[in-house]
Image (tube, helix red, strand yellow):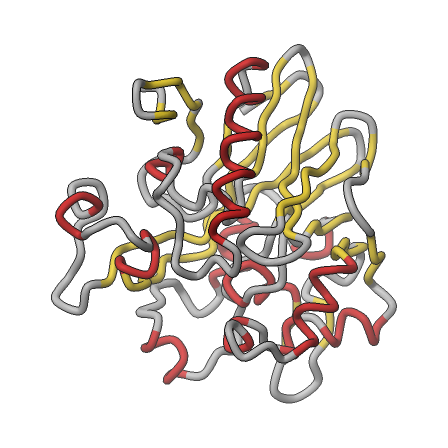
Amino acid sequence: MQLGRFKITPIEFGHFRLDGGAMFGVIPRVLWERYHPADEKNTIDMVMRAMMIEVDERKILVDTGFGEGRSEKFRKIYSFRGSDNFVDDALNAAGTSREMITDVIVTHLHFDHAGGSTIDKETNPKPAFPNATYYIQKRQLEHARSGMERDKASYLREDFEPLIDSGAVEIVDGEWQLLNGIDTIICNGHTPGMQLVRVRSGGKTLVYAADLFPLAVQFNFPWIMAYDLYPVTTLEEKKRILNQAVEEDWTFFFEHDPEWITGKPVRTNKGYGLKV
């Protein structure tokens, strides 16, 4: 899709499954399964969808998916589905390659968002995109290193420490701008220092929703993941961002929704929903 001077391309890095109850928190299954049917293990289908932004000579990748080099046990736990060379296959299908990526913005360091940032994880871990600068939020990196029992299983050091060691990372602190028309929005409910990427050009705005709205149905206020560390903070962030989004006619890019790539919110008598 073309957004003013920016070319936007979705890059799918495979499908996986997570527990539906965890994805919807306090919302009962009888409600959420209308939108995302569960299997016999109560898991729902999800996609890892990165976003590539092209402008001038820059190719900017937002998030990197699950990553290659995972153990067979790990792949089975999350029912991962993708080819053996799924990163290269997906990039090639989009007319690019690892070497052509100039910038990687990592929304946060959970393995399904940052896992594809490194390769050769068990032998000689190094950046998967050798010519790119990676951008990671300071507060998120500190949290990922903290070992907090609540979510430490979501952080795998081989996904991000080799980036730091190689000198490929620029640590950013708070909202920042990569270049004119590309900036970030900071959210702290899901995890501290998660950065949503906002692209603005030609009178249009597209926001990479990351795990604030992993699925389109989560425009609904109380549909908040049990994975979120601070769900009340998430609720306030959703209200603030959705209000601005409707006022300014934003479109959101969904990272995990297997059906909806993009969508706009609309006000309803219950809050907000997906404009269809």
Name the residue located 47 percent from the left edge and 61 percent from the top edge. Answer: 86
Q: Quick check: 27 above or below 200?
A: below
Is 95 placed left or right of 129 in the picture? Answer: left
Residue 164: horizontal and vertical position, in percent? Answer: 81, 71
Residue 119: horizontal and vertical position, in percent? Answer: 63, 73
Residue situated in front as seen by the camera: 174 or 111? 174
Q: Quick check: 209 above or below 102?
A: above
Is 194 placed left or right of 19 in the picture? Answer: right
As drawn, the residue found furthest toward the top would be 203
As drawn, the residue found furthest toward the bottom would be 123
Residue situated in front as seen by the camera: 41 or 23? 23
Report the number of discs.
0
Name the residue located 68 percent from the left edge and 65 percent from the top edge. Answer: 128
Q: Quick check: 202 above or below 146?
A: above
Residue 199: horizontal and vertical position, in percent? Answer: 67, 28
Name the residue located 33 percent from the left edge and 37 percent from the top edge. Answer: 217
As drawn, the residue found furthest toward the right would be 167
Residue situated in front as seen by the camera: 200 or 29? 29
Give residue 201's quadrant in the image. top right
Name the residue located 83 percent from the left edge and 76 percent from the top edge. Answer: 165
Is 21 placed left or right of 15 in the picture? Answer: left
Give residue 76's quadrant in the image. bottom left
Residue 230: horizontal and vertical position, in percent? Answer: 52, 56
* Quarter that holds the C terminus: top left
